[in-house]
Amino acid sequence: MVDFSFPVDGFISVLDYLGTIAFAITGASKAISHKADIFGIIVLATVVGVGGGVTRDVLFGRFPVAFSDPIYVILTVITGVVMFFLFSYLKKKMNIWLVVDAVGLGVFSVIGASIAFQIVGMNFLPMLFGGMITAIGGGILRDIFVREIPIVFVKEVYAVASLIGIVIFYLVLSTSNDIQIASIIGIVAATGIRLLAMKFNWNLPKVRES
């Protein structure tokens, strides 16, 4: 989620909103697959949509942006309601939202790292943690809520795409000192890797059991 004290342009803000909606859709879809009622659908949509950013802000000692700027919760609630009534139609369009989700992953990764940069400066580990928890924290909470092993731990190049995007953001920022350029390159890197992983069905190696 965007902290508007940070100088991001309107385009990244729009991507941030779309990413919030896309993440909320994955939460609502998971709730529907577990036969949740409309309240459960809205709750899980909101948890996924804003959970990563709220977790990041709490751990960094900040008042959560999602609580001070209601647009994020409004978007997730609307998404949950729309999914409740139109799921049978929207599931046919899910590929579109998987692409938007990939963009959201890149945007959230860079925004989280940027907020850590505001707080601690050019310190790589806090920036990496801030970016990754923003990008994947909501999805981890979603899976825990429905008593599943978080999908980022067992399949799909998702968290790794976030990690690479943050590393590239950090490297570009440390050499250019241009946060706008670093943000765009980091977002493109994380999003691109995620889209390639979906296209070619990339997964990380696992232990082979005998």
Image (tube, rainbow, N blue to C red):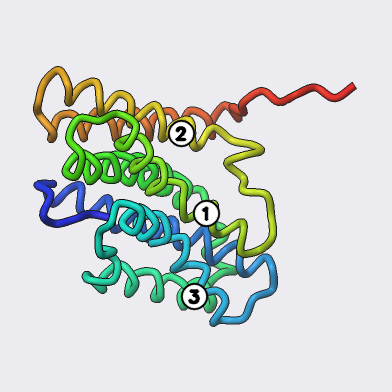
Q: Under tag 3, what secondary structure? A: helix
Q: Under tag 1, what secondary structure? A: helix
In the rendering, at what x and y percent does residue 76 appear? Answer: 39, 69
Q: Which mark is residue 94?
A: 1
> Relative to 39, is 176 on the left or the right?
left
> Relative to 90, is 103 on the left or the right?
left
Select label 1 or label 3 by which is in front: 3
Amino acid type, label 3:
Ile
| Quarter occupied by residue 112 | top left
In the rendering, at what x and y percent does residue 193 appear? Answer: 43, 28
Q: Residue at x 41, y 46 (%)?
A: 133
Mark 1 vs 3: CB contact within 8 A: no
> Taking 161 as reference, is 79 above or below it?
below
Q: Nearer the viewer, residue 210 or 190?
A: 210
Going from the N terminus, do you reach mark 2 or mark 1 first? 1
Going from the N terminus, do you reach mark 1 or mark 3 first? 3
Residue that carries the numbered disc 3 in the rendered image: 42
Residue that carries the numbered disc 2 in the rendered image: 194
Amino acid type, label 2:
Arg
